[in-house]
Amino acid sequence: MRGFRPITCFLLATPMAMGVYSSSMRTAFGQELPNIPIQDAPETFTDASTDGNIEVMTRGPIHEAFASPINAGGGDPLAVPNQPPEPIEEVPPDVKPEDESAVWIGGYWAWDDDRNDFNWVSGVWRVPPPGKTWVAGYWTEAPGGYSWVSGFWAAADQEQVAYYPQPPESLEQGPTSEPPSPDDVWISGCWMWSESGYAWRPGYWAAGRPNWIWTSASYYWSPRGWVFRDGYWDYQLARRGLLFAPVHFRGNYYRRPGFHYTPSVVWNARYLPFALFLRPSYGHYYYGDYYASSYDRLGFYP
């Protein structure tokens, strides 16, 4: 690894993607964090689509900009056999969160093992984590088919993305001592790259923040190398915005000339933890009934 030079590329960020904040609270790390109201699903957006060619799903992958699992760097990405379709034209719904900093993050195709076909993960209205901007994921050709390159929340002032060798397996085993305070949270350890290679950064206790969630540092696979994203504070699920249900288009319905799709059915984020599954090889959380043993063999974990 000593001869490896990280590759960098430029990030494109818009003022809309960065968000603007006003009222705030201070974290243990000196960040200013805004107070965001809980976002309830609007009553006018709870009916399923009346279009018989669009199936609104009651389970499926959660848009990774809304919630994405931590990847310590191990394991190969999932390869699916079919090439994904071109992204559809998605029109954001008029109903949005009360917070003016909420931004629309578009949807994308996701592979469905049961159907042996792609579903559309609807876009989301998302209140960005403080100081973060979204870098969208994408499909790429890979050995065995096509693999998903995960999106991630990058620092809003970050102009380049660095690519590193695959990190070793994580050494994280949880807290090594009792918390100094009942409100403290454990910040997981992770591998950090330097000129001499990877070095382990041990975990530690830090002051927790009521109504906030610490998102640990993570690595993301890409064809050019692994991307490191450091840890950050994020909103509770109910304060992140509006999460719309994924859909399945029957046949080639979405290929019609002039076709566009507007999400209309909201998943209530308050209930996500009660049926939440993790699929590390795909880098996604899933919501719904994935308890059958067949899903265990596919790499789903409750």
Image (cartoon, rainbow, N blue to C red):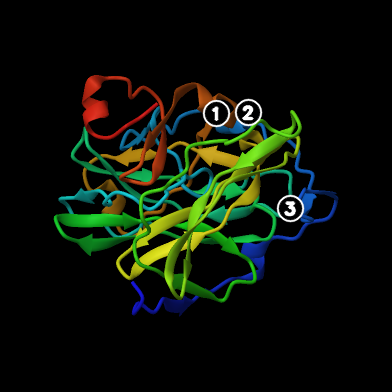
Camera-side residue of 280 and 188: 188
Q: At numbered mark 2, what does the secondary structure look like: helix, strand or loop?
A: helix
Which residue is tagged 3? 100
Q: The residue under label 2 is which amino acid type?
A: Glu
- Is 281 left or right of 80, judged from the image as shown? right
CB atoms at circles 3 and 1 under 8 Å apart? no
Which residue is tagged 1? 46
- The residue depicted at 34 percent of the width and 61 percent of the height is 166
3 lies above or below 242: below
- The residue depicted at 38 percent of the width and 53 percent of the height is 73
Distance from the alpha carbon under mark 2 to that under mark 3: 20 Å
- Is 60 left or right of 26, judged from the image as shown? left
Q: At numbered mark 1, what does the secondary structure look like: helix, strand or loop?
A: loop
Task: Indicate which disc, 3 or 1, sits on the residue closer to the N terminus.
Answer: 1
Residue 118 in view: yes
Task: Indicate which disc, 2 or 3, sits on the residue closer to the N terminus.
Answer: 2
259 lies above or below 183: below
Quadrant of the rendering where the C terminus is positioned: top left
Distance from the alpha carbon under mark 1 to that under mark 2: 6 Å
Distance from the alpha carbon under mark 3 to that under mark 1: 22 Å
Q: Few, some or many C-alpha atoms within 10 Å of disc 3 (few <14, some 14-19, many ≥20)?
A: few
Q: Nearer the viewer, mark 2 or mark 3?
A: 3
**Which disc is residue 43 wearing?**
2
Q: Position of residue 165 (x, y in %)?
A: 35, 66
Q: The residue under label 1 is which amino acid type?
A: Thr
